[in-house]
């Protein structure tokens, strides 16, 4: 199998592995991505989880996963992956376990853990060249506690801790570059609303060894304040407006896998979401909208040059 | 068996080696570092078939240790002081995974002020975590306790991680003659690690450490760990008895020294208890019927054994090498809770704090405690807890303060030192 396995939509897995009936919110973009990711990673896997929304996927005595699961804490899921991977390697090396019992070790955390508290543990795992996958479902805030701003929150977004007229004053941290600076085997951004792009990247990650790092932008009806039925539209617009660049880092190079052309104006993406409604009501804040548009424009100018 | 001069750290490393540990997640911290350096050296020289990985923190180290133990390998790790506290979230977390492994803690005083000298506040902070605790007073005991700890942790009725505690500097860096058990006999004693039903395999998926909703299932699992910890006292007797049969060294839950016929008793933990032992001998020479009890086990707490050993004694002095701010000595409180309301409990249970940050406890102080003990017993009154400190020490601190004061005054007056 290779990334070329997925040329068309009809090549995507038709059997879906992740169980339904989880307590994730309606329209959860993270769960959408995870469903597709799990179909490709498969059940010969162990998911090492950090505190976040998806901790509630496995609540005693139920789990939607067909493989294994280990909840750790908010900061140390990559260290949990280290322990499991090392133990599996020791068991294989000492002939105490058959190859058939080996599995993909996958870290699953939100942006709160990935961009902040768990960054040191992630850096450590990459520097040790740990053979694992890291899936960050990024809904741009501490979603499970009611969407306070995190290191992943975009400029101007209204959150539970940035309710002022200009929203969040900071800027979304560039985790893709921080991760890539470690020169791991693979880094990619994905989104559940681009299934082919996602499938190719997860398949590529699956086939590689070493740290394979995935950031899935996860449109969040609850935290971003939009109707759950618009989740796919919001996700598609994140890509079409150029706000969420789909790209991968492999062999020292960054390649954009889907360049939006022409790019739609960012306000089409922003105005669907309540967290940006202060840019449009009670009166339109052109200065702030233009600032966001200019940032996106500058990013793509760098890419094109 | 070979007899060698070993530091406490060296003895701990030998314990890990003789237990055939598979995996050693590590992080350096004084005064523990010699343990992981020794193990790393053996691995490099192929003397030990294990994998050592240096994590980026103790928080990660303890996570990796328990995750590996949950996957079915034998795990040893070591830390100290601030490191133990940095990993504290994970101590509590992984104890609930019921994945056995052994963690050596080299006790060292906690900040602030930051120091390197030993006391037990670090290990006492882990008291309620779910880890069992074995406290050592000699280098021999460190090695032997590490072997015993694996048997205890991995026992099917226990399955809890165990901390083996030794005092920084006084044990960690002090060389003592240690009998190193024959490696085959040690392997026979510890046995192979059977992960039983807690292990991750592709063919047998498992969800570990999942969330629960509500206090009822939460309480159930917390009670289970507590009952396993209580049960482990009986298992400790079994595995130490077996150890004695194979190696000829007995490690009771409480080490009794001249306490059988004693009217009065010192109670102390760790290596400083050897100072109390010497004081007991000297006091006995003067006709003072005094003895010493040194609990090896802090968790499970050997309450019933204390009740039996202290029955009908006239008075007990607990010397705590820790300080719970606003309350006092932790061991004193635990002992009081164990003895209160029991028939024949000693009427007098006095509390002393000493040895913080490695501060010495002199023979004279033990003599003073002993005479205070006898006087209080005669008067039938319990004096308030005492913080051991001498006039000389106070004078030395006053000198330091005077220097600090002069320097501060100089700075305030704008004088520079050129």
Image (cartoon, coloured by chain):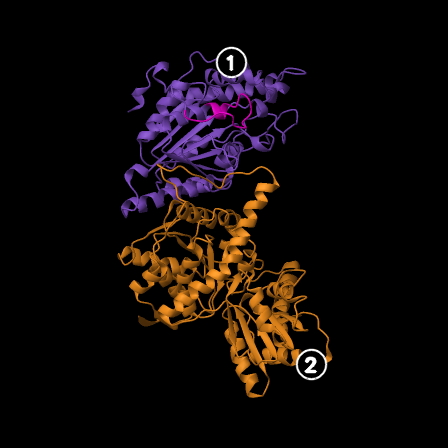
Q: Residue at x 63, y 30 (%)?
A: A160
Does B54 sit left or right of B324 as displayed? left
Quadrant location of residue B241? Answer: bottom left
Above or below: residue A3 compared with residue B140: above
Labels 1, 2: one chain = no
Could you give the CA–CA distance between mark 1 and mark 2, rounded to whole angstroms?
88 Å
Span shown in magenta? A17-32
Regarding residue A250, the answer to whether it shows in the image is no
Main secondary-structure element of the magenta-colored stretch: loop
Residue B408 image point, x, y percent: 64, 61
Viewer-side residue, A40 vs A95 = A95
Q: What is the crowding at mark 1: few (fewer than 14 residues within 10 Å), some, or many (at least 20)?
A: some
Chain letter behind tag 1: A
Q: Quadrant of the C terminus of chain B?
A: bottom right
Chain letter behind tag 2: B
Name the outermost residue toward the bottom: B286
Chain A color in figure: purple
Q: Quadrant of the N terminus of chain B?
A: bottom left
Q: Is residue A113 magenta?
A: no
Q: Residue at x 30, y 58 (%)?
A: B42
Q: Secondary structure at mark 1?
A: loop
Residue A106, disc? none
Q: To which residue does mark 1 refer?
A: A265
Name the mark nearer the viewer: 1 or 2: 2
Q: What is the crowding at mark 2: few (fewer than 14 residues within 10 Å), some, or many (at least 20)?
A: some
Q: Secondary structure at mark 2?
A: helix
Viewer-side residue, A210 vs A181 = A210
Residue B375, disc? 2
Chain B color in figure: orange
């Amino acid at each position: 199998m290779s990334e070329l396995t997925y040329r068309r939509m009809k090549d995507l897995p038709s059997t879906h592995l992740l169980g339904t009936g989880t307590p994730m919110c309606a329209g959860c973009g993270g769960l959408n991505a995870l469903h597709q990711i799990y179909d490709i990673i498969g059940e010969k896997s162990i998911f090492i989880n950090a505190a976040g929304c998806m901790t509630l996927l496995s609540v005693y005595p139920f789990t939607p996963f067909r493989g294994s699961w280990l909840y750790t804490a908010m900061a140390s899921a990559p260290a949990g992956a280290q322990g499991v991977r090392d133990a599996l390697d020791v068991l294989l090396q000492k002939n105490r376990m058959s190859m058939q019992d080996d599995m993909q070790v996958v870290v699953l955390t939100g942006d709160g853990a990935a961009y902040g508290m768990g960054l040191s543990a992630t850096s450590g795992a990459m520097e040790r060249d740990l053979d694992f996958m890291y899936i960050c479902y990024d809904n741009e805030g501490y979603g499970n506690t009611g969407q306070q701003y995190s290191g992943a929150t975009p400029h101007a977004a209204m959150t539970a801790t940035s309710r002022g007229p200009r929203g969040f004053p900071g800027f979304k941290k560039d985790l893709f570059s921080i991760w890539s600076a470690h020169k791991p085997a693979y880094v990619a951004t994905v989104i559940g609303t681009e299934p082919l792009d996602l499938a190719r990247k997860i398949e590529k990650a699956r086939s590689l060894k070493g740290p394979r790092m995935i950031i899935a932008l996860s449109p969040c009806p609850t935290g971003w304040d939009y109707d759950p039925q618009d989740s796919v539209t919001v996700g598609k617009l994140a890509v079409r407006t150029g706000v969420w660049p789909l790209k991968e880092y492999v062999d020292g190079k960054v390649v954009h896998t889907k360049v939006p052309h022409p790019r739609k104006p960012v306000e089409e993406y922003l105005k669907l979401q309540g967290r940006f409604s202060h840019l449009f009501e009670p009166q339109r804040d052109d200065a702030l909208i233009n600032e966001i548009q200019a940032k996106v424009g500058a990013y793509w100018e760098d890419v094109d040059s | 068996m070979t007899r060698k001069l070993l530091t406490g750290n060296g003895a701990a490393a030998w314990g890990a080696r003789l237990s055939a540990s598979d995996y050693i997640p590590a992080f350096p911290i004084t005064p523990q570092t010699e343990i992981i350096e020794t193990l790393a050296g053996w691995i490099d020289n192929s003397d030990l078939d294990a994998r050592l990985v240096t994590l980026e923190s103790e928080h990660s180290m303890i996570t990796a240790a328990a995750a590996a133990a949950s996957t079915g390998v034998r795990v040893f790790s070591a830390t100290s002081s601030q490191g133990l506290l940095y990993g504290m979230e994970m101590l509590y977390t992984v104890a609930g995974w019921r994945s056995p492994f052994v963690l050596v803690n080299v006790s060292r005083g906690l900040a602030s002020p930051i120091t390197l000298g030993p006391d037990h506040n670090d290990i006492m902070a882990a008291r309620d975590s779910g880890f069992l605790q074995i406290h050592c007073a000699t280098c021999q005991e460190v090695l032997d306790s590490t072997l015993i700890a694996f048997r205890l942790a991995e026992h099917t009725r226990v399955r809890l991680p165990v901390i083996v505690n030794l005092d920084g500097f006084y044990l960690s860096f002090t060389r003592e003659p240690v009998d190193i058990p024959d490696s085959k006999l040690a392997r026979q004693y510890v046995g192979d690690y059977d992960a039983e039903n807690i292990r991750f395999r592709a063919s047998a998926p498992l969800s570990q450490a999942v969330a629960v909703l509500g206090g009822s299932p939460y309480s159930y699992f917390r009670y289970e760990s507590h009952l396993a910890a209580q049960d482990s006292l009986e298992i400790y007797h079994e595995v130490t008895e077996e150890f004695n049969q194979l190696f000829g060294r007995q490690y009771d839950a409480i080490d009794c020294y001249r306490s059988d016929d004693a009217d009065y008793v010192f109670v102390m933990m760790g290596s400083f208890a050897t100072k109390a032992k010497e004081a007991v001998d000297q006091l006995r020479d003067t006709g003072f019927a005094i003895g010493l009890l040194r609990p090896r086990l802090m968790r499970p707490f050997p309450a019933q054994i204390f009740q039996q050993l202290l029955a009908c004694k006239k008075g007990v002095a607990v010397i705590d090498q820790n300080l719970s701010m606003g309350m006092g000595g932790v061991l004193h409180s635990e002992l009081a809770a164990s003895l209160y309301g029991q028939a024949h409990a000693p009427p007098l249970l006095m509390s002393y704090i000493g040895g913080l940050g490695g501060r010495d406890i002199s023979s004279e102080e033990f003599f003073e405690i002993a005479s205070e003990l006898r006087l209080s017993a005669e008067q039938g009154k319990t004096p308030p807890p005492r913080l051991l400190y001498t006039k000389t020490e106070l004078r030395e601190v006053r000198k330091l303060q005077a220097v600090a004061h002069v320097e501060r005054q100089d700075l305030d007056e704008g004088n520079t030192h050129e």
